[in-house]
Amino acid sequence: MIRTDSSISDAMPRSEAIKVVKEYEKNGINAYIVSEDEGNRLKENGNKFNTPKWS
């Protein structure tokens, strides 16, 4: 699943998700690949997403 600032996609194969995220990046849209479980949790909890922080 792909999570953007405004939406969460339906489940899709990982390879497809990577292609979609790369296209979003080209268009200046922040997008993250999340597991199906995490995507469903986000949908149920009002899309409250903790942005990953890389150290």
Image (cartoon, grey):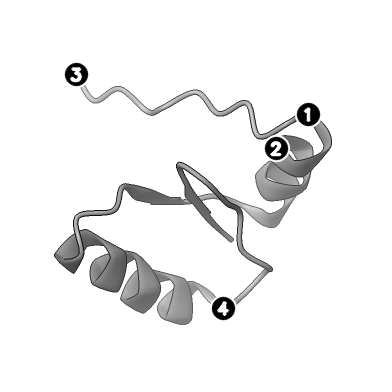
Q: Nearer the viewer, residue 45 or 36?
A: 45
Q: Can you identify the residue that label 3 sits on?
A: 55
Task: Identify the amino acid type marked 4.
Answer: Pro
Task: Identify the amino acid type marked 1.
Answer: Asn
Q: Quadrant of residue 22?
A: bottom left
Task: Identify the amino acid type marked 2.
Answer: Leu
Q: Secondary structure at mark 2?
A: helix
* Disc 4 to disc 2, C-alpha distance: 19 Å
Residues at marks 4 and 2 touching, judged by CB atoms closer than 8 Å: no
* Disc 3 to disc 4, C-alpha distance: 28 Å
For residue 24, which numbered disc appears in the image?
Answer: none
Q: Nearer the viewer, residue 9 or 35?
A: 9
Q: Can you identify the residue that label 1 sits on?
A: 45
- Residue 24's spot in the image, x, y percent? 30, 64
- Residue 49's spot in the image, x, y percent? 55, 29
Decide which of tag 3 and tag 1 comes sooner along the chain: 1
